[in-house]
Image (cartoon, rainbow, N blue to C red):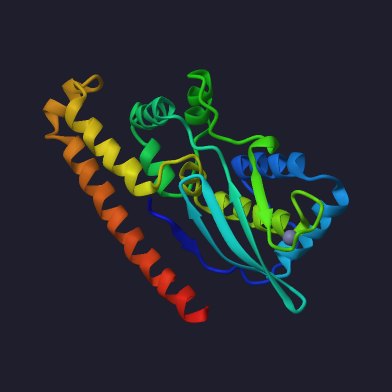
Amino acid sequence: MTAITHPRVAPRRGGVGGTWWSKAFLRAVEEAAFSTAELKLGRAHARSGGVGAITVGEGTFVAAVFDRDDVFTVTGTVPVLPADDQSVLVELIAAEAGRIGALMAGDLPHPLVESVEEAGVELLPYGGELGSACTCEGWLDPCPHALAVLTQLAWLIQRDPFVLIQLRGLGRDEVLARLHALSRTLPRTASTAEDQESGDPDEIDDLAIAEEAALRAARELTLLKASGERA
Ligand SMILES: [Zn+2]
């Protein structure tokens, strides 16, 4: 388990563009909402800066939500993929050059998700899969606090699709470790002739991935420290 704490989001106005996958996640949030009234409250709360840092683990998320003089805790779950499906996901990331680079750069390639779906694996959750509980004990489930956290989760996923993959059970480090293991065990299938001509691009790719991972880890540590100091 490698839970990652994403720092509190400052208040912002509406009209966040979104990416196709964050919009898909937001549609699931809409499906999960009891009515548009709660959804509107939740979104307004998300934009108001009332949600604290969100800690995302494998299949879990938790955040404090500030509402007037009260502080509530929202905990939530997304079903993690079964082990076989996790392997399929990693294999399909490895299947095409550039996919891991795209993920690292904050992009979720549509063809990747399509081939994942064709393999019978659902990366994007539907409304019924978004479980949540809140200490406000409101009778609505999800309450507007939970909807606020879910809305901000969509913003996090928009910026970094690894947040979505982690909610499905695979942290970024785990994905990288498995890709690395795959690259050592799988027989070479593509562009072998090209490789022979120009050295070993795989080694260069691995190095680039490792460097990128190290940079991100360093940045995350800084963010963690910053959010810790603010808390
Ligand atoms: Zn609540």
Looking at the image, is 155 positioned above or below residue 80? below
Residue at the location (78% across, 62% down)? 44
Looking at the image, is 97 positioned above or below residue 44? above
Is 210 positioned to the left or the right of 47 in the image? left
Residue 151 shows up from this direction: no
Give how far across and how far down residue 200 sits, in percent.
Answer: 14, 35
Residue at the location (35% across, 26% down)? 95
Looking at the image, is 170 positioned above or below residue 159? above
Looking at the image, is 199 positioned above or below residue 53? above
Is 207 positioned to the left or the right of 104 in the image? left
Give how far across and how far down residue 103 sits, in percent.
Answer: 43, 43
Residue at the location (88% across, 53% down)? 37
Give how far across and how far down residue 38 sits, in percent.
Answer: 83, 53
Q: Quadrant of residue 68?
A: bottom right
Is 81 positioned to the left or the right of 71 in the image? left
Q: Nearer the viewer, residue 49 or 158?
A: 49
Q: Nearer the viewer, residue 28 or 20?
A: 28
Residue 19 shows up from this direction: yes
Q: How many callouts does the rendering have? A: 0
Q: Nearer the viewer, residue 164 or 129?
A: 129
Give how far across and how far down residue 117 sits, in percent.
Answer: 53, 23
Quadrant of the rendered image holding ligand 1: bottom right
Q: Nearer the viewer, residue 139 or 106?
A: 139
